[in-house]
Image (cartoon, rainbow, N blue to C red):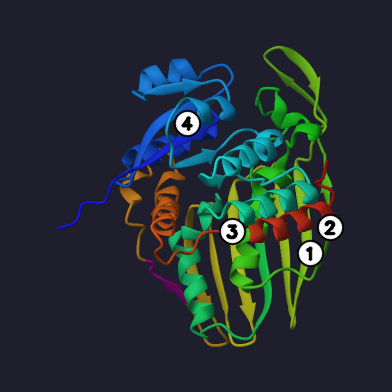
Amino acid sequence: MVTMSKLRIGIVGAGFGVRAHLPALLAHPRFDVVALASPHSAQRIASERGIAHAFTSCEEMLRGCELDAITVASPPFAHRDDVLAVLGARKHVLCEKPFALNVAQAREMLEASQRAGTVCAVSHEFRWVPARQAIKEMIVNGHVKPLREIEITQLSDFLRLQGTRERGWWFDRERGGGIAGALLSHVIDMASWLAARAPQRATGYIRTANPQRRDAKGDFTSTVDDGAFALVDYGDGLVARLTVDATTAQNSFTLAVHAENRTAVESGKSATETTLYSIDADETSELQCKASPYAHLTSVQPNVPYLMELYDNFAAAIGGAPHSLPSFAEAVETQKVLAAIGFSV
Protein backbone atom coordinates (compact mmCIF):
# COMPACT_ATOMS: atom_id res chain seq x y z
CA MET A 1 0.00 0.00 0.00
CA VAL A 2 1.42 3.39 -1.05
CA THR A 3 1.11 6.18 1.50
CA MET A 4 0.79 9.61 -0.10
CA SER A 5 2.71 12.41 1.56
CA LYS A 6 0.74 15.31 2.94
CA LEU A 7 0.68 18.65 1.17
CA ARG A 8 1.98 21.53 3.27
CA ILE A 9 -0.54 24.35 3.10
CA GLY A 10 -0.82 27.82 4.55
CA ILE A 11 -3.93 29.96 5.01
CA VAL A 12 -3.99 33.72 4.42
CA GLY A 13 -6.85 35.34 6.35
CA ALA A 14 -8.21 34.83 9.86
CA GLY A 15 -11.92 35.33 9.12
CA PHE A 16 -13.65 32.77 6.92
CA GLY A 17 -10.22 31.20 6.45
CA VAL A 18 -10.24 30.20 10.13
CA ARG A 19 -14.00 29.58 10.52
CA ALA A 20 -14.35 27.24 7.51
CA HIS A 21 -11.15 26.50 5.57
CA LEU A 22 -9.08 25.68 8.67
CA PRO A 23 -11.43 22.98 10.08
CA ALA A 24 -11.81 21.49 6.59
CA LEU A 25 -8.05 21.32 6.10
CA LEU A 26 -7.42 19.99 9.62
CA ALA A 27 -9.88 17.16 8.87
CA HIS A 28 -8.53 16.45 5.40
CA PRO A 29 -6.08 13.53 5.15
CA ARG A 30 -4.06 15.07 2.29
CA PHE A 31 -3.19 18.42 3.88
CA ASP A 32 -1.02 19.60 6.74
CA VAL A 33 -1.76 23.17 7.84
CA VAL A 34 1.67 24.54 8.72
CA ALA A 35 1.12 28.32 8.60
CA LEU A 36 -1.42 31.10 9.07
CA ALA A 37 -1.06 34.71 7.97
CA SER A 38 -3.12 37.65 9.22
CA PRO A 39 -2.13 41.21 10.15
CA HIS A 40 -3.39 41.08 13.73
CA SER A 41 -4.50 37.66 15.01
CA ALA A 42 -2.36 35.00 13.34
CA GLN A 43 -0.07 34.38 16.32
CA ARG A 44 -2.93 33.95 18.79
CA ILE A 45 -4.95 31.64 16.52
CA ALA A 46 -1.91 29.61 15.51
CA SER A 47 -1.09 29.02 19.18
CA GLU A 48 -4.69 28.02 19.97
CA ARG A 49 -4.97 25.65 16.97
CA GLY A 50 -1.51 24.12 17.07
CA ILE A 51 -0.30 25.66 13.80
CA ALA A 52 3.49 25.77 13.62
CA HIS A 53 4.01 29.17 11.99
CA ALA A 54 2.27 32.55 12.17
CA PHE A 55 2.91 35.57 9.96
CA THR A 56 1.47 39.02 9.40
CA SER A 57 1.25 38.74 5.59
CA CYS A 58 1.23 36.33 2.67
CA GLU A 59 4.63 37.57 1.50
CA GLU A 60 6.13 37.00 4.94
CA MET A 61 4.66 33.49 5.02
CA LEU A 62 6.15 32.64 1.63
CA ARG A 63 9.58 33.72 2.86
CA GLY A 64 9.28 32.14 6.28
CA CYS A 65 8.39 28.49 5.73
CA GLU A 66 8.23 25.69 3.17
CA LEU A 67 4.83 25.31 1.53
CA ASP A 68 3.26 23.40 -1.33
CA ALA A 69 0.03 25.39 -1.52
CA ILE A 70 -1.78 28.39 -0.08
CA THR A 71 -5.44 29.18 0.51
CA VAL A 72 -6.03 32.89 -0.03
CA ALA A 73 -8.96 33.79 2.21
CA SER A 74 -7.94 37.39 2.84
CA PRO A 75 -10.46 40.22 2.20
CA PRO A 76 -11.22 40.86 -1.50
CA PHE A 77 -9.05 43.97 -1.72
CA ALA A 78 -5.99 41.81 -0.92
CA HIS A 79 -6.69 38.92 -3.32
CA ARG A 80 -4.74 40.29 -6.27
CA ASP A 81 -1.53 40.98 -4.34
CA ASP A 82 -1.72 37.74 -2.35
CA VAL A 83 -2.44 35.54 -5.39
CA LEU A 84 0.31 37.19 -7.45
CA ALA A 85 2.78 36.65 -4.58
CA VAL A 86 1.83 32.95 -4.37
CA LEU A 87 2.13 32.49 -8.12
CA GLY A 88 5.44 34.36 -8.15
CA ALA A 89 6.70 31.73 -5.72
CA ARG A 90 5.35 28.96 -8.01
CA LYS A 91 2.97 27.57 -5.39
CA HIS A 92 -0.48 26.06 -5.89
CA VAL A 93 -3.29 28.42 -4.87
CA LEU A 94 -6.96 28.31 -3.94
CA CYS A 95 -8.53 31.79 -3.85
CA GLU A 96 -11.74 32.80 -2.10
CA LYS A 97 -14.44 34.78 -3.87
CA PRO A 98 -15.06 37.44 -5.02
CA PHE A 99 -11.98 36.62 -7.09
CA ALA A 100 -11.05 40.27 -7.71
CA LEU A 101 -12.25 43.85 -7.43
CA ASN A 102 -12.54 44.25 -11.20
CA VAL A 103 -12.03 42.45 -14.52
CA ALA A 104 -8.52 43.83 -15.05
CA GLN A 105 -7.33 42.29 -11.75
CA ALA A 106 -9.02 38.99 -12.60
CA ARG A 107 -7.30 38.83 -15.98
CA GLU A 108 -3.97 39.72 -14.41
CA MET A 109 -4.25 36.79 -12.00
CA LEU A 110 -5.33 34.43 -14.78
CA GLU A 111 -2.31 35.43 -16.91
CA ALA A 112 0.00 35.00 -13.92
CA SER A 113 -1.43 31.52 -13.29
CA GLN A 114 -0.71 30.53 -16.88
CA ARG A 115 2.90 31.62 -16.50
CA ALA A 116 3.31 29.88 -13.14
CA GLY A 117 1.94 26.55 -14.34
CA THR A 118 0.70 25.60 -10.87
CA VAL A 119 -2.76 24.40 -9.84
CA CYS A 120 -5.05 27.41 -9.41
CA ALA A 121 -8.70 27.35 -8.36
CA VAL A 122 -11.47 29.47 -6.86
CA SER A 123 -13.43 28.50 -3.76
CA HIS A 124 -16.89 27.83 -5.17
CA GLU A 125 -17.59 24.93 -2.85
CA PHE A 126 -21.38 25.06 -3.33
CA ARG A 127 -20.97 23.13 -6.58
CA TRP A 128 -20.69 20.06 -4.34
CA VAL A 129 -24.02 20.43 -2.54
CA PRO A 130 -25.74 17.07 -3.24
CA ALA A 131 -28.86 18.52 -4.89
CA ARG A 132 -26.66 20.66 -7.15
CA GLN A 133 -24.61 17.64 -8.15
CA ALA A 134 -27.83 15.78 -8.93
CA ILE A 135 -29.15 18.63 -11.11
CA LYS A 136 -25.85 18.78 -12.97
CA GLU A 137 -26.05 15.03 -13.59
CA MET A 138 -29.63 15.36 -14.86
CA ILE A 139 -28.49 17.99 -17.37
CA VAL A 140 -25.42 16.04 -18.49
CA ASN A 141 -27.44 12.85 -18.95
CA GLY A 142 -30.14 14.62 -20.96
CA HIS A 143 -32.95 14.17 -18.45
CA VAL A 144 -33.59 17.93 -18.48
CA LYS A 145 -33.44 19.26 -22.03
CA PRO A 146 -33.19 21.50 -23.84
CA LEU A 147 -32.39 24.05 -21.13
CA ARG A 148 -34.22 27.34 -21.45
CA GLU A 149 -33.85 29.09 -18.10
CA ILE A 150 -31.81 28.90 -14.91
CA GLU A 151 -33.40 30.60 -11.92
CA ILE A 152 -31.48 31.15 -8.68
CA THR A 153 -32.81 33.24 -5.79
CA GLN A 154 -31.08 33.55 -2.43
CA LEU A 155 -32.84 35.57 0.27
CA SER A 156 -31.55 36.37 3.74
CA ASP A 157 -32.17 38.76 6.61
CA PHE A 158 -28.68 39.65 7.83
CA LEU A 159 -28.52 43.13 6.24
CA ARG A 160 -31.94 44.35 7.34
CA LEU A 161 -31.93 47.55 9.40
CA GLN A 162 -32.35 45.40 12.50
CA GLY A 163 -29.13 43.56 11.66
CA THR A 164 -26.09 44.06 13.89
CA ARG A 165 -23.19 43.19 11.60
CA GLU A 166 -20.19 45.24 12.68
CA ARG A 167 -18.63 47.89 10.46
CA GLY A 168 -15.41 47.08 8.60
CA TRP A 169 -14.19 46.41 5.08
CA TRP A 170 -17.37 44.44 4.35
CA PHE A 171 -19.33 47.74 4.25
CA ASP A 172 -16.74 49.53 2.09
CA ARG A 173 -17.29 49.40 -1.69
CA GLU A 174 -13.68 50.35 -2.44
CA ARG A 175 -12.45 47.31 -0.52
CA GLY A 176 -14.77 44.80 -2.19
CA GLY A 177 -17.55 44.58 0.37
CA GLY A 178 -21.20 43.92 -0.33
CA ILE A 179 -23.58 41.14 -1.22
CA ALA A 180 -22.70 40.95 -4.94
CA GLY A 181 -19.16 39.88 -4.20
CA ALA A 182 -20.08 37.77 -1.19
CA LEU A 183 -23.01 35.81 -2.64
CA LEU A 184 -23.86 36.70 -6.24
CA SER A 185 -20.37 35.56 -7.27
CA HIS A 186 -21.34 32.05 -6.06
CA VAL A 187 -24.69 32.25 -7.84
CA ILE A 188 -23.16 33.33 -11.16
CA ASP A 189 -20.66 30.48 -10.90
CA MET A 190 -23.48 28.00 -10.26
CA ALA A 191 -25.40 29.20 -13.32
CA SER A 192 -22.36 29.06 -15.61
CA TRP A 193 -21.38 25.63 -14.28
CA LEU A 194 -24.88 24.29 -14.97
CA ALA A 195 -24.94 25.96 -18.39
CA ALA A 196 -21.49 24.47 -19.12
CA ARG A 197 -20.42 27.60 -20.95
CA ALA A 198 -19.47 31.22 -20.38
CA PRO A 199 -22.05 34.02 -20.46
CA GLN A 200 -22.40 35.89 -23.74
CA ARG A 201 -23.82 39.05 -22.19
CA ALA A 202 -25.29 40.24 -18.90
CA THR A 203 -27.25 43.10 -17.47
CA GLY A 204 -28.64 44.02 -14.06
CA TYR A 205 -27.90 46.23 -11.11
CA ILE A 206 -26.87 46.37 -7.50
CA ARG A 207 -28.96 48.10 -4.86
CA THR A 208 -28.37 49.67 -1.46
CA ALA A 209 -31.61 49.75 0.50
CA ASN A 210 -30.04 50.47 3.90
CA PRO A 211 -27.01 52.80 3.60
CA GLN A 212 -27.37 54.13 7.14
CA ARG A 213 -26.48 51.45 9.64
CA ARG A 214 -25.66 51.07 13.32
CA ASP A 215 -23.41 48.79 15.36
CA ALA A 216 -22.16 48.79 18.96
CA LYS A 217 -19.98 51.82 18.22
CA GLY A 218 -22.84 53.92 16.84
CA ASP A 219 -24.07 55.03 13.43
CA PHE A 220 -22.10 54.53 10.22
CA THR A 221 -22.66 54.67 6.46
CA SER A 222 -22.50 51.62 4.20
CA THR A 223 -21.31 52.21 0.62
CA VAL A 224 -22.00 48.65 -0.56
CA ASP A 225 -24.93 46.80 -2.06
CA ASP A 226 -27.34 44.74 0.05
CA GLY A 227 -29.08 43.32 -3.03
CA ALA A 228 -27.77 42.25 -6.44
CA PHE A 229 -29.72 41.18 -9.53
CA ALA A 230 -28.48 39.83 -12.88
CA LEU A 231 -29.98 38.65 -16.16
CA VAL A 232 -27.46 36.52 -18.06
CA ASP A 233 -27.64 35.28 -21.65
CA TYR A 234 -25.76 32.03 -22.33
CA GLY A 235 -26.79 31.82 -25.97
CA ASP A 236 -28.60 28.97 -27.72
CA GLY A 237 -31.87 29.93 -26.04
CA LEU A 238 -30.64 29.75 -22.43
CA VAL A 239 -31.04 32.65 -20.00
CA ALA A 240 -30.38 32.89 -16.24
CA ARG A 241 -32.24 35.07 -13.72
CA LEU A 242 -30.10 35.55 -10.62
CA THR A 243 -31.04 37.29 -7.36
CA VAL A 244 -29.43 37.73 -3.97
CA ASP A 245 -31.11 39.97 -1.41
CA ALA A 246 -30.06 40.26 2.22
CA THR A 247 -32.87 42.60 3.35
CA THR A 248 -35.79 40.18 3.48
CA ALA A 249 -37.73 38.73 6.39
CA GLN A 250 -36.90 35.16 5.44
CA ASN A 251 -33.89 33.01 4.69
CA SER A 252 -34.41 30.85 1.63
CA PHE A 253 -32.67 29.42 -1.43
CA THR A 254 -34.20 28.31 -4.71
CA LEU A 255 -32.39 26.93 -7.74
CA ALA A 256 -34.42 25.78 -10.72
CA VAL A 257 -33.45 24.65 -14.20
CA HIS A 258 -36.36 24.93 -16.61
CA ALA A 259 -36.28 22.89 -19.81
CA GLU A 260 -38.82 22.05 -22.49
CA ASN A 261 -39.41 18.58 -21.06
CA ARG A 262 -39.30 19.23 -17.30
CA THR A 263 -38.10 21.42 -14.44
CA ALA A 264 -35.68 20.38 -11.73
CA VAL A 265 -35.85 22.58 -8.65
CA GLU A 266 -34.17 22.55 -5.27
CA SER A 267 -35.37 24.76 -2.47
CA GLY A 268 -34.81 25.19 1.23
CA LYS A 269 -33.78 27.58 3.95
CA SER A 270 -30.18 27.99 2.77
CA ALA A 271 -27.83 27.15 -0.10
CA THR A 272 -26.72 24.00 1.74
CA GLU A 273 -30.08 22.77 3.07
CA THR A 274 -32.43 22.02 0.17
CA THR A 275 -34.86 19.43 -1.15
CA LEU A 276 -34.83 18.45 -4.83
CA TYR A 277 -37.92 17.98 -7.01
CA SER A 278 -38.52 16.94 -10.62
CA ILE A 279 -41.61 18.48 -12.24
CA ASP A 280 -43.11 17.58 -15.61
CA ALA A 281 -46.55 17.81 -17.19
CA ASP A 282 -47.82 14.78 -15.28
CA GLU A 283 -46.34 14.85 -11.78
CA THR A 284 -44.04 16.36 -9.21
CA SER A 285 -41.57 13.95 -7.64
CA GLU A 286 -39.25 14.48 -4.69
CA LEU A 287 -35.82 13.09 -5.48
CA GLN A 288 -33.48 11.60 -2.90
CA CYS A 289 -29.86 12.75 -3.16
CA LYS A 290 -26.81 10.90 -1.95
CA ALA A 291 -25.39 12.80 1.02
CA SER A 292 -21.94 14.32 0.97
CA PRO A 293 -19.32 11.87 2.23
CA TYR A 294 -18.39 14.57 4.72
CA ALA A 295 -21.93 15.35 5.92
CA HIS A 296 -20.91 14.51 9.48
CA LEU A 297 -18.82 17.71 9.50
CA THR A 298 -21.82 20.01 8.95
CA SER A 299 -22.01 20.77 12.65
CA VAL A 300 -18.47 22.17 12.57
CA GLN A 301 -19.50 24.80 9.99
CA PRO A 302 -22.10 24.39 7.20
CA ASN A 303 -19.60 24.95 4.36
CA VAL A 304 -17.04 22.45 5.64
CA PRO A 305 -18.41 19.28 3.94
CA TYR A 306 -18.33 21.01 0.55
CA LEU A 307 -14.93 22.55 1.17
CA MET A 308 -13.70 19.03 1.91
CA GLU A 309 -14.83 17.94 -1.56
CA LEU A 310 -13.25 21.04 -3.07
CA TYR A 311 -9.98 20.11 -1.35
CA ASP A 312 -10.34 16.53 -2.61
CA ASN A 313 -10.24 17.98 -6.12
CA PHE A 314 -7.43 20.40 -5.23
CA ALA A 315 -5.27 17.52 -3.98
CA ALA A 316 -6.16 15.43 -7.04
CA ALA A 317 -5.16 18.25 -9.38
CA ILE A 318 -1.86 18.79 -7.58
CA GLY A 319 -1.18 15.07 -7.99
CA GLY A 320 -1.99 15.19 -11.70
CA ALA A 321 -5.27 13.29 -11.39
CA PRO A 322 -8.63 14.23 -12.98
CA HIS A 323 -10.50 16.96 -11.12
CA SER A 324 -13.40 19.40 -11.46
CA LEU A 325 -12.00 22.54 -9.83
CA PRO A 326 -13.57 25.96 -10.47
CA SER A 327 -10.90 27.66 -12.58
CA PHE A 328 -9.36 31.11 -12.77
CA ALA A 329 -10.65 31.34 -16.37
CA GLU A 330 -14.20 30.75 -15.13
CA ALA A 331 -13.63 33.34 -12.40
CA VAL A 332 -12.78 35.94 -15.04
CA GLU A 333 -16.13 35.28 -16.72
CA THR A 334 -17.93 35.63 -13.37
CA GLN A 335 -16.09 38.91 -12.80
CA LYS A 336 -17.37 40.21 -16.15
CA VAL A 337 -20.96 39.61 -15.05
CA LEU A 338 -20.31 41.33 -11.71
CA ALA A 339 -18.85 44.31 -13.57
CA ALA A 340 -21.84 44.44 -15.91
CA ILE A 341 -24.21 45.00 -12.96
CA GLY A 342 -22.00 47.53 -11.17
CA PHE A 343 -19.63 45.55 -8.91
CA SER A 344 -16.26 46.95 -9.97
CA VAL A 345 -13.73 49.20 -8.27
Q: Looking at the picture, which amino acid does disc 4 mark?
A: Val
- Labelled pair 4, 1 in contact (Cβ < 8 Å): no
Measured Cα–Cα span from mark 4 to mark 1 = 34 Å
Residue found 46% across the figure and 70% down from its top: 134
What residue does disc 3 label?
327
Q: Please tell me whether mark 2 sits on a helix, a strand or a loop.
A: strand
Majority secondary structure of the magenta segment?
Answer: strand
Residue found 82% across the figure and 39% down from its top: 208
Q: Please tell me whether mark 4 sits on a helix, a strand or a loop.
A: helix
Measured Cα–Cα span from mark 1 to mark 2 = 6 Å
Measured Cα–Cα span from mark 3 to mark 2 = 24 Å
Q: Looking at the picture, which amino acid does disc 3 mark?
A: Ser
What residue does disc 4 label?
18
Mark whose residue sits in front, 3 or 2: 3
Residue extent of the magenta highlight: 285-289
- Labelled pair 1, 2 in contact (Cβ < 8 Å): yes
What residue does disc 1 label?
231
Mark 2 surroundings within 10 Å by alpha-carbon count, few (fewer than 14), some (14 through 19), many (20 or more): some
Mark 1 surroundings within 10 Å by alpha-carbon count, few (fewer than 14), some (14 through 19), many (20 or more): many
* Mark nearer the N terminus (3 vs 1): 1
Q: Is residue 197 magenta?
A: no
* Mark nearer the N terminus (4 vs 3): 4
